[in-house]
Amino acid sequence: MSDQPQLRLGVNIDHVATVRNARGGAYPDPLRAAKIAEEAGADGITAHLREDRRHISDADIEGLAEVLSVPLNFEMAATDEMQAIALRHKPHAVCIVPEKREERTTEGGLEVAREENRLAHFIAPLREAGCRVSIFIAADRPQIEAAHRIGAQVIELHTGAYCDAHAEGRFDDRDAELERLREMAALGHELGLEVHAGHGLTYDTVKPIAAFPELRELNIGHFLIGEAIFRGLQPAIAEMRRLMDEARA
């Protein structure tokens, strides 16, 4: 076995709420999914409260804060409304993400370098409240250096371009993106940041990312919720956990 620390798995339950909201009822319940994920070996639960409440609701966040025994990672846009909600609940972690109403999912990393001053002031109260502040960014040196300057403790590298290139058979692009992610994970670690990664990861793409020694956490959601339709949520998560551990061995 490797002497590296175990790579943590954060399970994003947003799309359990997406299915629930398709009918406007109470099922399937994201809180139940979160508890199953805990039992399956998730090290944390991630939930994104969007401005338009398209999946996770305010009541979901309140419920998660009450029932979870693993850390809650609260994904949020850098708005006054979301800051107030985070300060009320004081989750273990907040991850600041870009958000546009017209996008289907989070399409890229946060623009930190151009908004350093605003974001530094935005995250200061969250840090003071005891939340671990993470910034979701592209694997781009200026963004990582800016995240470090504003006082973020964590960066989460956007793996979407790597996963898309793999899915589309653009293997040269995939390999180039993987190398960029590897280099930027090393840079973040050198700067003293805790390095996470996520977005679009599947069984086929997770192991090369999980093998990065600087990584401490992966956040995976949509694929696991989709895979749960076929094999159940607990086995779907257990298989992802197995692949992550194998990559670190």
Image (spheres, rainbow, N blue to C red):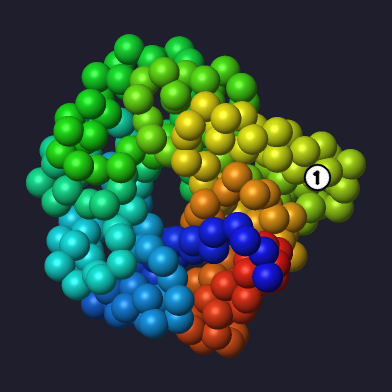
For residue 120, above or below residue 64:
above
Q: Where, quadrant-wise, is the N terminus in this rendering? A: bottom right
- The answer, for residue 44, to whether it is visible in the render is yes
**How far from the left and from the top, in percent, is residue 49?**
29, 50
Placement of 42 over or under 229, stated as above or below: above
Residue drawn at (82%, 37%) of the image:
176
Identified at 79% across, 53% down, the residue is: 166
Residue with the most extreme front position: 3
The residue drawn where x is 72% and y is 45% is 162
Q: Percent x, y for residue 185?
A: 62, 38
Tell me the residue that label 1 is attached to: 174
Q: Quadrant of residue 223?
A: bottom right
| SS category of the residue bearing label 1 | helix
Q: Position of residue 57 (x, y in %)?
A: 24, 58
Instruction: Please provide percent x and percent y for residue 116.
Output: 38, 15
The three-letter code of the residue at mark 1 reads: Arg
Residue closest to the eye, 164 or 120: 120
Q: Nearer the viewer, residue 61 or 244?
A: 244
